[in-house]
Amino acid sequence: MEKYSNRIIITHWLTLALLVAAWFLGDSLDDARHEGGATITGYMVHSLVGGAVLLLTLTRIAFRRTDGAPPPMGDTLLDKVAKGVHHLLYVLLIVLPLSGIMQVLTSKVGKALMAGDASLLPKKFEGVAAHDVHEILVNVLIAVAVVHVLGALKHQFVTKDNIMARMSLRNKK
Ligand code: HEM
Ligand code: HEM
């Protein structure tokens, strides 16, 4: 079976790990702010992990252009939907971190980070559109990723075409 290149496979699974971490850190940050305990370190770590998702995605797209990808599993409507879902995931993996960066730049978070002073951190994000956009995009990404995972599970366990081998480093045929 034709597979993705090793470096594309590694970046696919590393992105998943970073996304889970960024999601957890972002949610903890939101909770900490509501409890009055948000820290500069908390915002820095979330921003760095989220920023790493953006850099990794741009790197992965460059890898894909050089290495190519295996041909689609088939030519049905569902195969075309799967391709659309992949494209949408790439767009979200870029736009979501960008909305996070915009949120920092257009709120008091940016000034607080520059000054290294947690007392300048905002209590609320009133009027900061990027904050609402970021939250909405997180939920859209989760929903689209769930559809993607369900598709992979359907291939693996219902169609039984061993799709996971295409995204696995193991050399099993
Ligand atoms: C793919 C990457 C990212 C994911 C999955 C992610 C996820 C999240 C989540 C789940 C929240 C909490 C939303 C809420 O409940 O209100 C959040 C908040 C936030 N994120 Fe991100 N984020 C990402 C990237 C970034 C980046 C790159 C930055 C900035 C450079 C950033 C800055 C923020 C800020 C400032 C908040 C507000 C925290 C608060 O409520 O006080 N995020 N993010
Ligand atoms: C447990 C979770 C996941 C599983 C089991 C999984 C599985 C797979 C598999 C088997 C493929 C290859 C599809 C094919 O050859 O047609 C694939 C591709 C892909 N996955 Fe995932 N995935 C998971 C999570 C994610 C997440 C969280 C994202 C991004 C948010 C993601 C983004 C992508 C993208 C963009 C492709 C297309 C690769 C390309 O053609 O460039 N995956 N995934």
Image (cartoon, rainbow, N blue to C red):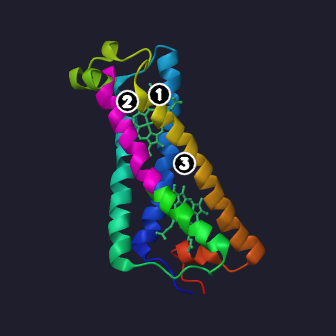
Q: CB of residue at label 3: within 8 Å of ligand 2?
A: yes
Horizontal side, residue 12 vs residue 97: left or right: right
User: Is the stretch drawn in magenta largely helix, strand or loop?
Assistant: helix
* Neighbours of disc 2 within 10 Å: few (<14), some (14-19), many (20+): many
Q: Is mark 1 within 8 Å of ligand 1?
A: yes
Q: Which residue lies furthest to the front in this view?
A: 77
Q: What stretch is highlighted in magenta?
A: 91-108
> Which residue in the structure is indicated by mark 1?
29
Indicate whether residue 104 is drawn in magenta.
Answer: yes
Q: What element carries label 1?
A: helix
Q: Residue at x 22, y 25 (%)?
A: 114
**Reading the chain from its start, which is encountered first: label 3 or label 2?**
2
Residue topped by disc 3: 141
Mark closer to the chain start, 2 or 1: 1
Residue where numbered disc 2 is placed: 43
Residue 60 location in percent, x, y? 38, 64
Numbered circle sitting on residue 171:
none
Image quadrant holding the N terminus, namely bottom right
Label 2: which secondary element: helix
Q: Which residue sits at x=53%, y=32%?
A: 27
From the viewer's perspective, is residue 33 above or below residue 160?
Answer: above
Q: Is residue 55 in view?
A: yes
